[in-house]
Amino acid sequence: MAARRHVPRKRFGQHFLVDSGIVERIIAAVDPQRSDHVVEIGPGLGALTVPLLARLEHLHVVEIDRDLSARLRENHPGRLTVHEVDALEFDFAALPAPLRIVGNLPYNISTPLLFHAAGAASRCRDLHFMLQREVVDRMAAKPAESEYGRLSVMLQYRFRIEHLFEVPPQAFRPAPKVRSAVVRLTPRPAEELTAVSEGGLSRIVAQAFSMRRKTLRNTLAGLISPAELAELGIDAGSRAQELTVAAFVTITNRLAGAGTGPRQRPLAK
């Protein structure tokens, strides 16, 4: 009934989860404990909010829709804090750590939201998201697979990624035109984050994938020579989608080391 009363807003990418069986599977995957610090992105009509509140002492939610924010405050006073703000602008560092992030992410901004959430990885225990299945496929893709790209590399550098299960369109109102999937992201420990500069890694990866059909000899020209790539055990004739995450880290660290003397070569912005 609540879903029928609220008209979904296209500009917010609203598709409300209405399948109780899928809700139960998500809650079971998250397995929230009473004292956990949890924030839900895009609570909407509260399909996940209500069962999360039933198991938590307190819950934070981030909701940009003022009507839904008001409804959430009215229906759940006391143990629910509603942050009425764009999730892309929300400061996760303002919440206690270790933080657990949960959300049915709007498909129209899912990629930038994933990068934004990744910025808080060091403060997180885990993240559980429902996303368009295509996005989850890209997140978990392996080198040489067609879906492998910048999103794959940057998220896999920061997280272990588990594709948990798929969700059909009819689990939502209104039903999206695509299938969805639930994914778990677990931050990697600090000792596995070996890039000298994560910003440098991000720029190298973005440049390497900027022309997917071109080889590294072309995409990284001016930054690192074919001979230097060969020294690192990397074929300059390879394309970006053939490189492992570790290979991108190796290139980044080589360039960071080269930036200390007369051979300094700034990374492209």
Image (spheres, grey):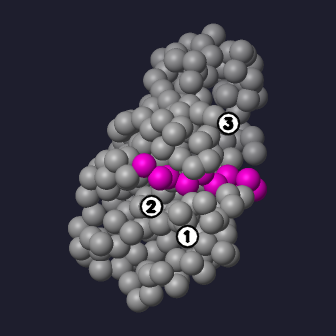
From the image, tell me which residue sits under label 1.
Answer: 62
Q: Quadrant of the C terminus?
A: top right
* Residue stretch in magenta: 10-19
User: Residue 224 versus residue 164: which sits nearer the camera?
Assistant: 164
From the image, tell me which residue sits under label 2.
Answer: 47
User: Residue 167 versus residue 113: which sits nearer the camera?
Assistant: 167
In this image, 21 relative to 95: left or right?
Answer: left
Secondary element type, mark 3: helix
Task: Decide which of tag 3 and tag 2 comes sooner along the chain.
Answer: 2
- CA gap, disc 3 and disc 2: 37 Å
User: Residue 96 versus residue 212: which sits nearer the camera?
Assistant: 96
Q: Residues within 10 Å of mark 2 (few under 14, many from 20)?
A: some
> Label 1 amino acid?
Val
- Is residue 189 visible in the rendered structure shown here? no
Residue appearing at x 59%, y 42% in the figure: 175
- CA gap, disc 1 and disc 3: 29 Å
Q: Nearer the viewer, mark 2 or mark 1?
A: 2
- Is residue 233 visible in the rendered structure shown here? yes
* Residue 206, numbered circle: 3
User: Residue 240 versus residue 173: which sits nearer the camera?
Assistant: 173
> Label 2 amino acid?
Ala
- CA gap, disc 2 and disc 1: 14 Å
Q: Position of residue 138 (x, y in %)?
A: 54, 31
Q: Nearer the viewer, mark 3 or mark 2?
A: 2
